[in-house]
Image: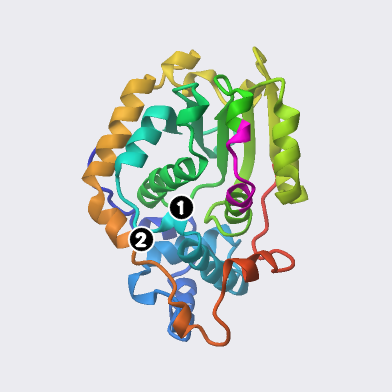
Amino acid sequence: MSSAVKPFPVEKEYEKNPNIKPEDIKKLREWLKTQPHLPADHLTDLDLMLTYYCCDRSQEVSKQVLDLHYTLRTLFTVFFKDRCLDRKIDLCLDTILFAPLPTPTLKGDRAVYVRLLDPDPRNFFFPETVRTFMMMFDMWQYEEGTWPGFVLVIDMDQAVMGHITRLEIMTVRQVLYFLQEAMLVKLKGVHFLNAPHFMDKLMMLLKPFLKKELLETMHIHQVNSDSFYQHMSKKALPKEEGGEYKDHATIRDELIQRMKTNTDFLREENKKRVNETLRPGKAKTVEDLFGIQGSFKKLDID
């Protein structure tokens, strides 16, 4: 777990996905050469494969999503600028558990389990939570390559109303925009476990920024409900949740060590950013992006 990230071999991706050919990735590479603002020199064939796969093998959609994905990584600086293990990330890892689960869902999708370790809302900083999550996610996905689908599991067990009041609207909007439009996964579902009595207030905050497709993939499981286990084996969860995976402290310590070991990986990823001064036409801003009508990337619905 604490070793340096080894990118998933692209040759194995072609074995995993026989309907994707090297020529498909080569076409995207050729197109990249015509886009001076994009970080073509720093994008690997695995980056292109992840994009092409999640865009259902459409060249045109892949081009749109590639541009948007790295544009958002450039403009959403609070999440993606100069990423490294610093004191804020350290505090976040003491406050929140980020656990990529080794056991897939019952449908074969990969899942991340997230929960509070520290119930004090004063130690909860949502932008740092997203920043930490994305650092963890990038390392994990780069090692495993394409997945049939991706599921996010959020355990609300320790959440109180004070956590909701610390959510900033613009940050929530940016997170949901990135998740729905530009994240390089086939998003199959979001599960909220141990839903608190104020779950309706959280949904009121989220709904204005949720597309119908994502709303339909959301599952809210009540306290002490077994309904989640229709989607995933209980054994897949950490020990404290009655599962057979590692305990919270081990998961946290291994992720801290993993980030320490992979400063080079994060430093290299920091170079995958857009140079807006070279963009043909007008440079993009956050305001422009939220003005975009329609959707590039189709959400997959279970």
Q: What are the residue bounds of the magenta stretch? A: 164-173
* Residue 300 in view: yes
| Residue on which the image places disc 2 | 11
Percent position (x, y) of residue 35?
47, 83
79 or 167, nearer to the observer: 167
204 or 98, nearer to the observer: 204
Quadrant in which residue 58 is drawn: bottom right
Q: 24 above or below 216?
A: below
Identify the residue at horizontal 44%, vertical 23% (top origin).
Answer: 117
Q: Amino acid at mark 2?
A: Glu
Q: 78 above or below 232?
A: below
Percent position (x, y) of residue 171?
58, 49
Disc 2 secondary structure class? helix
| Residue on which the image places disc 1 | 79
Q: Main secondary structure of the magenta part?
A: helix
Q: Amino acid at mark 1?
A: Phe
Q: 216 above or below 122?
A: below
Residue 258 is tagged as none
* Residue 101 in view: no
Q: Is residue 83 magenta?
A: no
80 on left or right of 265: right
* Neighbours of disc 2 within 10 Å: few (<14), some (14-19), many (20+): few
Quadrant in which residue 223 is drawn: top right
Quadrant in which residue 251 is drawn: top left
Q: Residue furthest front?
A: 122
